[in-house]
């Protein structure tokens, strides 16, 4: 059995390493985009929730802002790790091109060993027929592959649906349903105990509470129209004026007008 | 998201149609009672009849009229109503039903 000359092995290793670095670079680039989509979704969610609170002339729930901070904090922490990966990867690629056998390359390779393995594993899992049956390695700075798939697909598309101003409770209801959908879908992609899971769950509960308030407002509006309709058909019936006027008054007391939306960039 | 812009909710619980009939019968009985009392001209009873008529007109008839309207609203609603409104209307209906009935008012006819 003949062995390859040392020089050829080194070249092959370098080529493989460069290829792996390229793959990792693409993955990190995508990851950065996904975190930015997630940040944007959270911003939109915050705007909508605060708008509902503002309409109710109530202070935001004491738990809302800390929960948002927690969620943003987790995203920021993960993003900063990802950016560190990117910086070190750039360093590694630079070193490979000038001093491929230097000590720094070994140190950086050690740094990236888990990330390389995770990336390769995930790429392999995604090629399988039933990827959900495999457990991927989770590393800081990288979202689980199912989360990435959701954010780069539906999550990104949903960002488009949240553009435009919200001018009615009906619009707001649709938006909150959209928020509930993305939170729920993203949550379902996370393994138990993932850093994003708890704040997302809390945000889901906060969104549900506001969604109920918005539905109540829609119900009041529709009930008022309905009372007007029936009131007209019963005009002249003794006692109807008293009943209708009082019930309409009570409904109006519960109704709040939709807050004027603040267009982005108008401030 | 666009498909989700309508509020789906349970339809309101329909008020018992029998309530309207019962309340109308009660109202009819009270109106007949008023007519009956108005036809009593005996000086000995007339002041009491007047007081009785006033009490029926002020304290019973309006409540029954409002109860009938409330029961009809509950039957006519095509949209779900807020819980509070349903409770208010049901309360009005119940207040009417709780009044003393003169369902035999027809017997007072001469």
Image (cartoon, coloured by chain):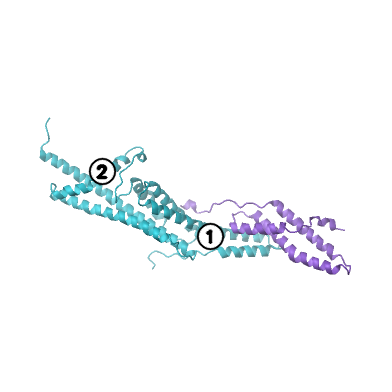
Chain for numbered disc 2:
A
Does dot 1 land on a helix, a strand or a loop?
helix
Badge 1 is on which residue? Answer: A217
Does dot 2 land on a helix, a strand or a loop?
helix
Residue at image location 69% in from the left, 51% down from the top: B17
Q: Is residue A211 visible?
A: yes
Residue at image location 47% in from the left, 54% down from the top: A208
Left or right: where A184 falls relative to A11 = right
Left or right: where B89 falls relative to A187 = right
Image colour assigned to chain A: cyan
Badge 2 is on which residue? Answer: A117
Front-most of B31 and B45? B45
Residue B21 coordinates in the image, percent (x, y) = 73, 53
Chain for numbered disc 1:
A
Image colour assigned to chain B: purple
Q: CA distance from mark 1 to mark 2?
A: 52 Å
Q: Which image quadrant: the C terminus of chain B?
A: bottom right
Front-most of A210 and A171? A210
Residue A3 coordinates in the image, percent (x, y) = 12, 34
Residue A122 coordinates in the image, percent (x, y) = 30, 43
Residue at image location 45% in from the left, 64% down from the top: A261
Residue A38 coordinates in the image, percent (x, y) = 36, 54
């Amino acid at each position: 059995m003949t062995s390859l000359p040392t020089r050829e092995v080194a070249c092959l290793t370098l080529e493989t390493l460069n290829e792996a670095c390229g793959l990792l670079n693409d993955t990190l680039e995508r990851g950065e985009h996904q975190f930015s989509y997630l940040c944007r979704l959270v911003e939109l969610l915050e705007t909508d929730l605060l708008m509902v609170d503002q309409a109710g002339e109530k202070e935001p729930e004491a738990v809302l802002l800390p929960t948002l901070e927690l969620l943003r904090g987790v995203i920021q922490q993960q993003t900063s790790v990802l950016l560190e990966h990117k910086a070190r990867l750039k360093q590694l690629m630079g070193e490979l091109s000038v001093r491929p056998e230097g000590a720094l390359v070994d140190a950086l390779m050690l740094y990236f060993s888990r990330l390389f393995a995770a990336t390769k594993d995930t790429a392999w899992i995604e090629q399988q027929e039933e990827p959900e049956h495999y457990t991927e390695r989770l590393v800081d700075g990288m979202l689980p592959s199912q989360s990435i798939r959701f954010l780069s697909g539906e999550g990104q598309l949903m960002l488009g649906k949240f553009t435009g101003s919200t001018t009615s409770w009906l619009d707001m209801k649709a938006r909150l349903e959209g928020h509930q959908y993305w939170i729920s879908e993203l949550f379902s992609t996370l393994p138990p105990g993932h850093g994003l899971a708890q704040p997302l769950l809390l945000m889901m509960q906060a969104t549900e509470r506001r969604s109920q308030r918005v539905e109540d407002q829609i119900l009041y509006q529709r009930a008022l129209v309905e009372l007007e309709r029936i009131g007209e058909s019963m005009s002249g019936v003794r006692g109807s004026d008293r009943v209708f006027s009082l019930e309409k008054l009570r409904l109006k007391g519960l109704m709040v007008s939709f807050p004027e939306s603040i267009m982005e960039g108008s401030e | 998201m666009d498909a989700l812009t309508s509020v789906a909710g349970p339809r309101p619980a329909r008020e018992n149609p029998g309530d309207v009939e019962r309340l109308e019968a009660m109202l009819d009985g009270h109106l007949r009672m008023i007519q009956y009392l108005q036809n009593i001209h005996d000086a000995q009873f007339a002041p009491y009849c007047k007081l009785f008529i006033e009490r029926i007109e002020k304290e019973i008839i309006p409540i029954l009229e409002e109860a009938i309207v409330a029961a009809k609203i509950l039957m006519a609603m095509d949209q779900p109503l807020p819980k509070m409104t349903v409770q208010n209307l049901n309360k009005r209906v119940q207040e009417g039903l709780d009044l003393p009935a003169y369902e035999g008012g027809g017997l007072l006819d001469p």
